[in-house]
Amino acid sequence: MTERIIVKIGSSSLTSDEGGLNRERIAFFSHEIAGLHRAGHQVLLVTSGAVAAGFRRIGYQSRPKLIHEKQAAAAVGQALLMQAYQEAFASYGPDKGGIGVAQILLTRADFSNRKRISNALMTIEELLQQRIVPIINENDTVSTDELKFSDNDMLSALVANLAKAKHLLILTDTDGLYTDDPRFNPDAKRIDRVEQISEEIMRFAGDSGSSVGTGGMRSKIEAARMAMRGGVPAFIGRVQEPGDMALAIEGTGKGTYFDTSLHNLPMKKQWVGFHSQPKGKIVIDDGAESALLQRGKSLLPVGVRAIEGDFHPGDVVEVVNLQQQTLGRGVVNYSAWEVQAVAGLSTSEVRRRVEVNRIEVIHRDEWVSLKV
Ligand SMILES: Nc1ncnc2c1ncn2[C@@H]1O[C@H](COP(=O)(O)OP(=O)(O)O)[C@@H](O)[C@H]1O
Ligand SMILES: N[C@@H](CCC(=O)OP(=O)(O)O)C(=O)O
């Protein structure tokens, strides 16, 4: 069966601490991806490594710390990175003419602009249709946040959601999530499967990893959480030997699997859930929480306890429970003062007091759960 697969490769898997690209590793990963491509899968590659590839060429002795230096290194390194992939993929393909690759550079801001991101998706769809492998990185020149926070893990999750992928493989230099950083704690145990990202799981993940990578395990877990919310199961682990990438997809890879029972989210819901700017907050009670999360119901006035912010019908609001935990986001049918006026009232009482087009504060079709 043909599946859509997002493969994310981190700097630590592609470069050395001294900087520069590891051509052997690039050839190896390209070979693995070519295998999936040959089997009929659609593969999108999200790759880091531009800064690490470029800083030596520019003349810096170590990975730069200043934003403008990182951006300069990325601008040099991105071209080197693409050249390396182009050459590596050139030797595969049905006619040995090679597998074509394409460069796509995105920023987080592109995802919050519906027009820009739907253009990006149309481009990706056409490339996949033409059997080209899209190679995606953050547009580092214009995206300072990325360089500060290392969002390539998150970028891969957003791409996985956007493309409604079947699998997200986040590849790194460790074979999955351990109970502690395995580089420092030899007693750390690997976790094979995660169904829910609990506080404990977050605690296991340390911050910064190797000296070339920037996000560490924590940013990978955040990315897995984002993918799970969008209905894409994730794998965090290592692909080291020939055939490992196929095993990762089959479910027997060297790493940790993050399962999800959610379905792929349509683009509009992705925007509401992940990229919109909520205009306010609605606090709901336990009954409403289980109606929304377990029973797939709409939010009715009776379950509302409090509100914050000033919003109008059609705005996106965040919904939290009594413990102030975020449950999700939705498009609200009422303005803030109307919700205030009807909070806690039964449906019949609401109809007597205010004139609204729809009784639901948030209809279930306009609701995105953010709890996984
Ligand atoms: N609980 C943990 N389990 C596994 N790895 C961890 C954990 N906590 C921290 N790490 C570290 O995270 C590193 C991977 O992150 P990073 O260097 O940013 O990778 P990449 O460049 O591949 O994105 C690993 O080398 C590992 O040492
Ligand atoms: N876009 C940057 C990514 C920075 C980075 O190191 O990311 P990662 O290796 O995924 O933690 C680059 O290509 O260098």
Image (cartoon, rainbow, N blue to C red):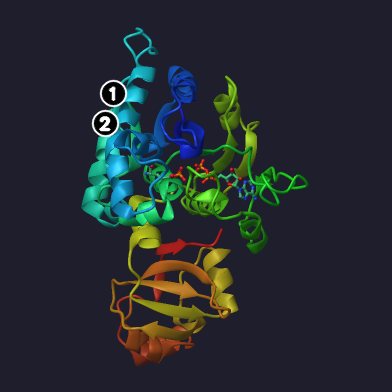
Q: Residue furthest top?
A: 95
Where is residue 302? Give x, y as percent. Answer: 49, 83
Residue 63 seen in the current view: yes
Q: Residue at x 64, y 51 (%)?
A: 195
The amino acid pointed to by label 1 is Gln
* Mark 1 Cα-neighbour bin, 10 Å: few <14, some 14–19, many ≥20: few
Is residue 128 visible from the viewing direction of this image?
no
Would residue 154 appear left or right of 109 to someone viewing this image?
A: right
**Residue at the image position 56 percent from the left and 25 percent from the top:** 246
- Which residue, given by chain and number where applicable, does mark 1 sit on? 130
**Circles 2 and 1: CB atoms closer than 8 Å:** yes
Label 2: how many residues lie within 10 Å, few (<14), some (14-19) or many (20+)? few
Vertical side of 59 occupied by 348: above or below: below
Q: Which residue is mark 2?
A: 126
Placement of the C terminus among the 4 image quadrants: bottom right
Q: Secondary structure at mark 1?
A: loop
Residue at image point 48% right, 42% down: 212
Q: Which mark is residue 154?
A: none
SS class, disc 2: helix
Image spot of residue 309 (x, y percent): 35, 83
Disc 2 CB within 8 Å of nearest ligand 2 atom:
no
Determine whether 234 is above or below 5 in the image. Answer: below
Vertical relation: 137 (above or below) 145: above
Image coords of residue 288 (percent x, y): 54, 75
Q: CA distance from mark 2 to mark 1?
A: 6 Å
Q: Exactly how many numbered labels are in the figure?
A: 2
Which is nearer the eye, 72 or 97?
A: 72
Residue 183, horizontal then vertical, whole percent: 66, 44
Question: Is 81 on the left-hand or right-hand side of 321?
Answer: left
Q: Is residue 13 above or below residue 148?
A: above
Q: Amino acid at mark 2?
A: Glu
| Horizontal side of residue 16 vs 181, given as left or right | left
